Amino acid sequence: MTERFPKGDAEADRAGASDTNSPLLEVDGLETHFPITTRWLRREVGRIRAVDGVSFAIDRGEAFGLVGESGSGKTTAAHSILGLEEPTGGAVRFDGQLVDELTGWELQQFRRRAQLVVQNPDDAFNPRLPVGKSVAEPLALHGMDDEERRRAIVADLLERVGLEATDANRFPHEFSGGEKQRLSIARALVVNPDLIVADEPTSALDGRVKADVLSLLDELRREFDIAVLCISHDIDVVRRFCDRVGVMYLGELVERGETEAVLESPAHPYTRVLIGSIPSLDPSDRSLVRPLTETVPAPSDPPSGCRFHPRCQELIPPTASLEREDWRAIARFRFALQEGTVPEPIAVDSGTRVDPETVRDAFDLPTDLPNEGIEDAVEAATRAVADGDLERARERLAESLSTVCERTQPEAGDECEHLVRCHRYDSTIEAEPIPWRG
Amino acid sequence: MSAGDDPQRFEDVDWTELERSRRTVTPARAVFVAGLALFGALLALQAAAVVPNWGFDHLDWITALGALVVLSFGVVPALEHHALARRVLRELLSRPLRGAAAVFLGVFAIVAALGPVVLGSPDLAFEHRFHAPYGFTGADRWHAECLGDIVEGEGITRYCEGTLQYPLGTNERGHPMGHLLVEGASVTLTVLVFTAAFVVPLATAVGVLAGVRGGAVDDLLMSYVDVQLCVPAIVAFFIGYMYWNVSLALLLVTFGLLSWGGIARLVRSETLQRRDDGYVLIARSLGGSWTYVAKRHVVPNITNTLVPAAFHLLALLVLVEAGVAFLGFHHVELYSWGSTVQEGLDPEFAGIGLEMQPHEIWWVSTFPALALTLTIASLKLIGDGLRDALDPRL
């Protein structure tokens, strides 16, 4: 684990607090691991690496998007930034100050200036309180004792987010999802924050309502110069709303840059899968980008090296002599065996032997590979699979098909203007980035 | 609207002006502390024996403390949030059966609290034993003088008509039944106050704490509850009965403090379902403490489970008290409904050589049994009624 908050740095940060050019929110190597404990005595037996070294910065008034599939650690990252989960490592700076070290009045100010909009509008409001009370709760918690004034502020605010002042007396169940999300935004806005963390603000809403809520959030952001950390699994939301975007996979940030650059010419293979998985409106375009294998590894036991490597279409081959398609087929064969997802014709459990040709066909394995070592390995593995010995096949393949992607963790690539954590963008590794075909 | 400093617009609030106030003096706490001070003064008076032959026993102190807790943390907050209290009350009274139950319990509480003070202890009047209620007749033998008219029956049987002097009749000691009902109600009210003031809050606090904190705290508390659920309260009571004086306080402490495990578990599981809800996250991200979250967000949202369970426990403990008294393990000076029923069913008449069948003196057992039944039914009805009235979705 990285050493937490070296003292010298912290002091330097304090000094830099007055510097208005520094970003509003700076997340540096954030790590949040959850221990897996035994029932008995709560001994730690493992860790779920929900967030594992995420860094980004958000400027004042900027909208930053965090995308990734469910389970990639986006929400945990957001909660760790707000102090709802205790980070296990890294640093979060708000206005130049380490959030972890804030106390008293300063902490209170951070809690006021950074607001959360939660994902599900249905549980965002206490069902037993009239929504006016819920929207006024931040005011009350931040010391506004004058109930009349709270009521007046909330009434004014409700009208400005497109609701009516009298709605304050109604209960949450009387509102639609879109209205509740407007109320959520009103509640976040009521203490005049500098940062709103919006966790999937529109995932529970349908098209029209989604667009309305997004444009409301966008308007308010521009009017009050509020930075927004927008967490979403929906590329479309990020495209419409965010200035910059970070792509998360299994707790790590794999790509980060200007929204347009990242979405128009995604560099990281995972970003490409994410963008390619949106069905196109053009019916002739059937080229959904699929990952090599479908199973997302568990964050308690992430793959070595680059975490995306078992699913990566652009996995770097051990030798340059292989055709790309051949290599993909072999890699798919290898990682499918590793996961244990073997296609239908090879029923391993039944104990019946199949013939190696069936195995080759089932995995579309190429023949006559130029590289002898690999040819041998594939040959041996197919035979092992035909015999029903998956373990031997796995070992044989792992031995001869070792790639840089599984051996070393990629650093930020230098062959791209924005951050890409992929070996293909590392000039010290002999593999060229594959151009994006859009 | 001026852009500068409109106090009613959120962007014009000057946050440096607002210091979070920490209200330590709430009306509830003020009442509670004032009550405690009063108790302290009374205790000092009692210790100094300023007034001769005056003093409270343990049970009185426990009841008074319970009443103070209910007053300061139940009645005072209800008055503070009078709009909500009025809405709940209106909702409760709008359904005839629940309304009737609420009225019954209200009358019951007033009678039970004031009755014994007004009536004092019932006097022995052996000459008026087994007098029938007004409008009914009872067997008239040589055992007592008949206050009403005497009706001739078959052969040598004669019947004595009830009179208005004892409208509900009398038992074998000539205690008026009405008076005994009031005495029994006062015992029952003691049980209710104790349970509502100590047992239910304890169960809720433990359940919420376990659910909200999780981890080792949860493990520890729930293991304790498991152990506690294995100890039969009646055994603890009988052990106490063997070694100390029998008293209602002993019954309350053993049964009350050993019977909350089930509610604590319910509350815990409900809390677990709510601790990750959006509004809890928001409150925490705003800097709300766990105590705040529990009071404002968790407890109000588990009333659907908690309120009926708490009222069930109240009814159960009332029944347990009556049952234990029925078995005869009660303090002889307390006229519990249970012991009165028992006297009506199995009258002992040492030395008077009289035998009477229970059905001949039916009023002795029927009236307290009826009161018990009505009280328990009312508690159940009000439990369900409060649950519905507290939920704005219903």
Image (cartoon, coloured by chain):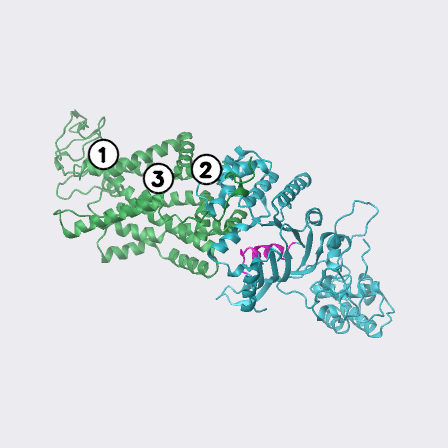
Chain colours: A cyan, B green
Q: Which stretch did the figure color magenta?
A: A70-86
Residue type indicated by callout 1? Gly
Q: Which of marks 2 and 1 is in front?
A: 2
Of badges 2 and 3, nearer the viewer stands 2
Report which residue position mark 3 lands on. Answer: B376
Q: Do the residues labelled 2 and 1 touch (CB within 8 Å)?
A: no
Q: Position of residue A76 (x, y in %)?
A: 59, 56
Give the image location of residue A239, x and y in percent.
71, 48
Q: Residues within 10 Å of mark 3 (few under 14, many from 20)?
A: many
Apparent side of residue A14 relative to residue B66 in the rendered image (left or right): right
Queried whether the magenta region covers residue A79, the answer comes back as yes
Q: What residue type is labelled 2?
A: Glu
Q: Which chain carries label 1?
A: B
Are circles 1 and 3 on residues that touch, CB within 8 Å?
Answer: no
Task: Determine whether the residue tagged by mark 2 lies in a helix, strand or loop.
Answer: helix
Residue name at image x 22 percent, y 34 percent: B178
Q: Helix, strand, or loop for circle 3?
A: helix
Mark 1 lies on residue: B178
